[in-house]
């Protein structure tokens, strides 16, 4: 069979399967990311039905998928929202980093993977999945809940922190050394601050390059600018993903809303390709030796993430049920965790990091989607009611 013909058949069949699985996941009320990863495992090296002609297509598509994921994430925030989140939730962001990054770093050191892998695994366990959590909030009708701004503030801080974390990790995994890592950090901070400044003071100028009323020019222009900046960012070791994220932040107003609408289907397509390719690059047999560490790490860091959300919501004056909703909603990991693991593995770092990250993400997304629904259960509401009555009837100290 001709190579192009086989490519079309493989890609077409796989996209059809992904579409059906996405619909199934939507019906069941959880993210399709675990299903995409499983499909990648099934068709990759060591899988049941390995692909022959389309692996290169998925490799290139996965790069575009990362860029589009981060661009769309940036479009959801304005520079002023980022600044406000940093001002209002600094303590929560610091607590989040300490509670959730340290277990990942500790696990890597316990497994004997070394300090660089510890930095990578710390990032995998640190960052919650903005995409999965946004879907959960929409599906459960919690966008207007009092705890939702607290959840979003934590996510914003995590996403912005990645603009500084990814360049340093890039320098470390390629063995660039301390000086190169410090240089990458300085460049990343300078670029991020410059773009945030331009977005705050001159965001209209960037947005004025595009028309929100002409879909064709909007798609071509925004995508072209994003890939250009991502390529330049990668050339100076700042990470293409970070460049795409900052472009999204710089675009604001009606242009950002229109760009988000017209680019969403393209994002969904290439994001699916990205998750599938990560599964393709992971041999299912490699997951078995790291399955126990992945389960231990998932249980531990879902617990620390619940604590993060609970404490942040308490500091914001949210009632007890809202604190639990905030903590349980934050448990899934996803996009950034896979991006970080993929970056490390592509640079030849610890080969078991990818299988562990795959298992870890699968566990946290599935379990997190279930845990987020616990506060809506009748038995949970009854317990919250009993706890509220107990506090109301408790004697006041000093009375």
Image (spheres, grey):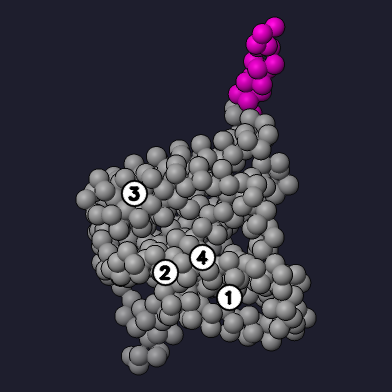
Assess whether mark 1 and mark 3 are in contact (beta carbons under 8 angstroms).
Answer: no
Q: CA distance from mark 4 to mark 2?
A: 9 Å
Residue drawn 51% across the image and 36% down it: 307
Foreground of the two, 42 or 345 = 345
Residue range (magenta): 381-399
Residue 273: in sight, yes or no?
Answer: no
Q: Is residue 157 in view from this perspective?
A: yes
Which mark is in front, 1 or 4? 4
- Quarter occupied by the N terminus: bottom left
Q: Is the C-beta separation of discs 3 and 4 under 8 Å?
A: no
CB atoms of marks 3 and 2 within 8 Å? no
Q: Which mark is residue 266?
A: 1
Choose top left, top right, bottom left or bottom right for residue 130: bottom right
Asked which secondary structure carries label 2, the reply is helix
Q: Residue 31: which disc?
A: none
Quarter the C terminus occupies: top right
- Between residues 94 and 20, which one lies in front from this camera angle? 94
């Amino acid at each position: 069979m001709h190579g192009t013909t086989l490519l079309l058949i493989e890609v077409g069949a796989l996209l059809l399967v992904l579409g059906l699985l996405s619909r199934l996941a939507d019906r069941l009320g959880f993210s399709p990311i675990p299903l995409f990863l499983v499909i990648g495992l099934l068709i990759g090296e060591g899988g049941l039905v390995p692909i022959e002609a389309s692996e290169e297509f998925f490799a290139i598509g996965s790069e575009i998928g990362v860029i589009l994921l981060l661009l769309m994430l940036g479009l959801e925030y304005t520079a002023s929202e980022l600044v406000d989140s940093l001002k209002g939730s600094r303590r929560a962001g610091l607590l989040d980093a300490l509670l959730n990054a340290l277990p990942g770093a500790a696990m890597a050191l316990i497994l004997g993977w070394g300090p660089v892998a510890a930095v990578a695994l710390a990032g995998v366990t640190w960052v919650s999945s903005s995409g999965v959590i946004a879907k959960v909030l929409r599906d459960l009708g919690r966008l207007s809940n009092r705890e939702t701004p607290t959840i979003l503030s934590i996510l914003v801080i995590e996403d912005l922190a990645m603009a500084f974390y990814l360049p340093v990790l890039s320098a470390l995994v390629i063995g660039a050394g301390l000086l190169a890592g410090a240089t990458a950090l300085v460049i990343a901070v300078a670029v991020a601050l410059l773009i945030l400044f331009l977005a705050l003071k001159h965001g209209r100028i960037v947005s004025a390059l595009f028309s929100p009323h002409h879909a064709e020019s909007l798609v071509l222009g925004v995508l072209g600018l994003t890939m250009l900046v991502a390529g330049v960012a990668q050339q100076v070791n700042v990470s293409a993903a970070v460049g795409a994220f900052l472009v999204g932040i710089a675009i604001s107003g009606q242009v950002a809303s229109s760009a988000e609408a017209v680019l969403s289907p393209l994002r969904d397509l290439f994001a699916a390709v990205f998750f599938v390719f990560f599964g393709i690059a992971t041999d299912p047999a490699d997951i078995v030796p790291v399955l126990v560490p992945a389960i231990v790490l998932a249980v531990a860091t879902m617990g620390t993430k619940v604590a993060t959300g609970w404490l942040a919501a308490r500091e914001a004056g949210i009632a007890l049920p809202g604190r639990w909703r905030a903590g349980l909603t934050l448990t899934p990991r996803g996009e950034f965790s896979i991006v970080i693991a993929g970056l490390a593995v592509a640079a030849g770092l610890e080969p078991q990091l990818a299988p562990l990250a795959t298992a870890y993400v699968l566990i946290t997304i599935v379990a997190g989607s279930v845990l987020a629904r616990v506060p809506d259960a009748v038995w949970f509401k009854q317990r919250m009611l009993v706890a509220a009555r107990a506090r109301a009837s408790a004697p006041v100290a000093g009375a």
